[in-house]
Image (tube, coloured by chain):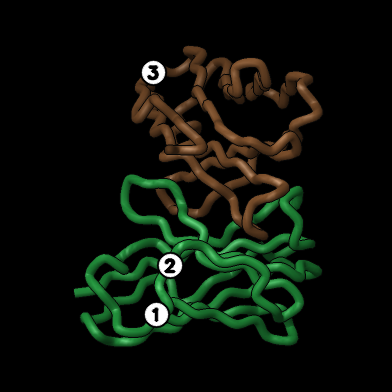
Chain colours: A green, B brown
Amino acid sequence: DAGVTQSPTHLIKTRGQHVTLRCSPISGHKSVSWYQQVLGQGPQFIFQYYEKEERGRGNFPDRFSARQFPNYSSELNVNALLLGDSALYLCASSTGQGFEDTQYFGPGTRLTVL
Amino acid sequence: AQKVTQAQTEISVVEKEDVTLDCVYETRDTTYYLFWYKQPPSGELVFLIRRNSFDEQNEISGRYSWNFQKSTSSFNFTITASQVVDSAVYFCALSEARGSQGNLIFGKGTKLSVKP
């Protein structure tokens, strides 16, 4: 069975631009969460979506937004990019939205902002 | 204050040595889950184990074992007879019943290097 997939693998943008990252969950999983991982740190929670609705949000500015589609895939959008947005963006999927659900991660999208 | 502390930033061992990665957590919830993930150089986080707060039994899976002690708020991970393929960054994570939905709280990770 296919795991979580993310696209693109790598992305280079300049300050002020906008970026869209995509994620497809494991088949049968209805929840998608997004994390930001800067070099040398653990992942930081950005959003969780379940059944197309936002169910959780981390401490990130409004420049970050996301949505989930009827097929449970998801997009993360970041506007007005800053140098500090350079990071590995990880998507995770789980069967449910609960704190007990194991999240399975994709390979990530490496975003570089110049 | 950090909720998940992995005090060992980097550990280097020689193949076949045993190694223990420490994880100390902090929560006011009585119901929570703890996780360990492995992140090889490719970047993908690989799930290793999940443990709920009511189950303090130690777990063994092949060369891997986990020691959960609520009294010391620790959930340590031991690799027996380490191998070069174990080289990776290992993360401990906490999920709280009263936390934000879907929010896994990660430690900063421990980078393990296993030399041949």
Q: Nearer the viewer, residue B71 or A3?
A: B71
Measure how far apart labels 1 and 3 are at the Cα level.
43 Å
Report the residue marked by disc 1: A63
Report the residue marked by disc 3: B13
Between label 1 and label 3, give the one nearer the viewer.
1
Mark 3 nearby-residue class (10 Å; few <14, some 14–19, many ≥20): some
Q: Are marks 3 and 2 on the same chain?
A: no
Q: Quadrant of residue A9?
A: bottom left
Q: Are marks 3 and 2 in contact (CB under 8 Å)?
A: no
Q: Are marks 1 and 3 in contact (CB under 8 Å)?
A: no
Which element carries disc 1, helix, strand or loop? loop
Q: Amino acid type of disc 3?
A: Val
Which element carries disc 3, helix, strand or loop? strand
Residue at the extreme front of the image, as rendered: B28
Q: Which mark is residue B19?
A: none
Residue A66 lies, in percent from the top left, at: 54, 80
Q: Quadrant of residue B81?
A: top right
Compared across the picture, whether A20 is left or right of A13 comes to right
- Label 1 resides on the chain identified as A
Q: Residue at x 49, y 17 (%)?
A: B19
Q: Amino acid type of disc 2?
A: Phe
Note whether B90 is above or below B63 in the view shown.
below
Residue A38 lies, in percent from the top left, at: 34, 55
